[in-house]
Image (tube, helix red, strand yellow):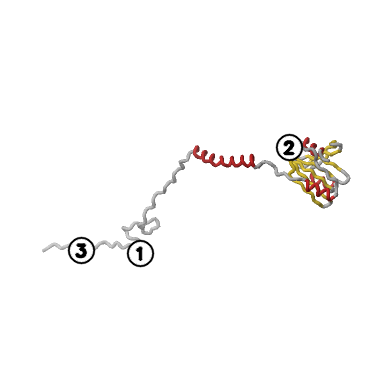
Amino acid sequence: MEPAQPADRVPADRTPPDGQPPADVPVGPGGDPAGDEPTPPPGVKPAKSERSPKDMAISLLVLLVPIALLLAFYRGFLGGDQATTVDPAPAIEQARSANVFPVSQPEGLSSEWSTVNARYQTVDGGANLRIGYLTPEGRGIQLLQSSVPAERLLPAELTDQGQPRGPTELAGRTWQLYTARGNQQALVLLEPTRTVIVVGDARDNELRELAGSLR
């Protein structure tokens, strides 16, 4: 009698429970089957700049040299640092034609004085003739001749900081020395039909030179 043969062995059922992946399928971090996505390549580190401080300095110098040459040309040949000058004669003539007040103008100033603006205009209470100058030292001075009453004109032009500091004689006229806004000072000439103000941040000697030259 032949020994009994073992029954055919049935492979174990590898079907997983519902919703679970097969046992031999890799599982991803979230429980889903891991796909066959390729592994991302490692990050590539940016290459370090190979420019040395010396190279950067040379590049900056190459940029600055043309700019310096342009500035030198502008200042040396085009007069870039020089103030634009104007002819005050039309404004002076207009003020004289209006005949609102006697008009004076400087005489005998050197060529180093520059006239940078000039304007005559009627205003509330009178009329003004303004002439702006650039002094030999490069300071600004304004010459104002006006028929506006002094009690209104002085606070408007010198602000509340304007305070008298005493009289001074210039070319046979008695002027009043005033403080003004900021670091400015002024010379004021009070007359029956006009008030003359010479004001600016120039030195005292330049203020006096302009005021004493009025004729």
- Residue in the image at 78% along x and 35% along y: 205
Given the current orientation, which residue lies at the most extreme right position? 192
- On residue 18, the disc is 1
Residue that badge 3 annotates: 8
Q: Position of residue 110 (x, y in %)?
A: 76, 37
Q: Position of residue 140 (x, y in %)?
A: 74, 41
Amino acid of disc 3: Asp
Of 188 and 155, the residue lying toward us: 188
Q: Is residue 178 visible?
A: no
Query: Which of the two discs, 3 and 2, sits closer to the camera?
Result: 2
Residue that badge 2 annotates: 136
> Callout 3: few (<14), some (14-19), or many (20+) C-alpha neighbours within 10 Å?
few
Q: CA distance from mark 2 to mark 1?
A: 101 Å
Task: Kindly check if marks 1 and 3 are in contact, taking CB atoms under 8 A apart as contact.
Answer: no
Query: Which of the two discs, 2 and 1, sits closer to the camera?
Result: 2
- Indicate the secondary structure of the residue bearing disc 2: loop
Q: Position of residue 121 (x, y in %)?
A: 80, 51
Horizontal arrangement in the rendering, residue 72 relative to residue 87 (left or right): left
Given the current orientation, which residue lies at the most extreme left position? 1
> Callout 2: few (<14), some (14-19), or many (20+) C-alpha neighbours within 10 Å?
some
> Callout 1: few (<14), some (14-19), or many (20+) C-alpha neighbours within 10 Å?
few
Hey, which quadrant is residue 22 in on the image? Answer: bottom left
- On residue 101, the disc is none
The numbered mark, 2 or 1, whose residue comes first in the sequence reads 1
Amino acid of disc 1: Asp
- Indicate the secondary structure of the residue bearing disc 3: loop
Q: CA distance from mark 1 to mark 3?
A: 28 Å
Horizontal arrangement in the rendering, residue 67 relative to residue 137 (left or right): left
Q: Is residue 101 above or below residue 136?
A: below
Q: Position of residue 84 (x, y in %)?
A: 70, 44
Q: Is residue 215 above or below residue 18?
A: above
- Indicate the secondary structure of the residue bearing disc 1: loop
